[in-house]
């Protein structure tokens, strides 16, 4: 009668084992879904990191340029100060 109704009689232990197999399969599907979400998030993070790296390189160039301009300006200021000192001391020497 059971087989005619497509029902297979099993013991409680066998039913439990079967249900645990189903549960493990569902957990596996859930883990796959979460892994896909993690991969998507990692792709976004990678893109954000690349954008940050680009900004960081630009900032580095600007800082190097600012440092170079500072050094160049400092050298010109020093020369200018020396020229002023030289010009101020020349009239004193002539008197």
Image: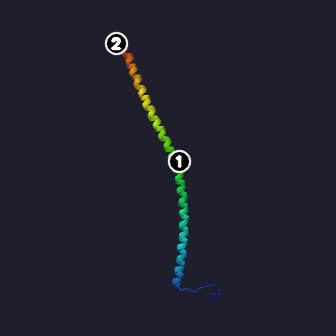
Q: Quadrant of residue 91?
A: top left
Badge 1 marks a residue whose secondary structure is helix
Asked whether 12 or 69 is in front, the reply is 69
Q: Are marks 2 and 1 in contact (CB under 8 Å)?
A: no
Residue at the spot 44% in from the left edge and 30% down from the top edge: 72
Q: How is the image coloured?
A: rainbow
Q: Which numbered disc, 2 or 1, marks the residue that appears first in the sequence?
A: 1
Which residue is label 2 attached to? 93
Label 2 and label 1: CA atoms lie apart by 63 Å
Residue at the spot 42% in from the left edge and 22% down from the top edge: 80
User: Residue 65 in the image: x percent, y percent?
Assistant: 47, 35
The crowd level at tag 2 (other Cα within 10 Å; few <14, some 14-19, many 20+) is few
Number of marks present in the image shown: 2
Assign the C terminus to one quadrant of the image. Answer: top left
User: Residue 87 in the image: x percent, y percent?
Assistant: 39, 16
Which residue is label 1 attached to? 51
User: Residue 4 in the image: x percent, y percent?
Assistant: 65, 87
Residue at the spot 54% in from the left edge and 51% down from the top edge: 47
Indicate whether 24 appears above or below 13.
above
User: Residue 58 in the image: x percent, y percent?
Assistant: 50, 41
Assign the N terminus to one quadrant of the image. Answer: bottom right
């Amino acid at each position: 009668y059971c087989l005619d109704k497509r029902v297979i009689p099993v013991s409680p232990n066998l039913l439990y084992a079967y249900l645990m197999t189903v549960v493990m399969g569902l957990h596996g599907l859930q883990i796959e879904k979460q892994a896909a979400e993690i991969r998507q998030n990692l792709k976004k993070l990678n893109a954000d990191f690349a954008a940050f790296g680009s900004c960081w390189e630009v900032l580095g160039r600007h800082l190097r340029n600012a440092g170079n301009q500072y050094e160049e300006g400092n050298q010109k200021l020093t020369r200018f100060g020396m020229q002023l000192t030289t010009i101020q001391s020349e009239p004193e020497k002539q008197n």
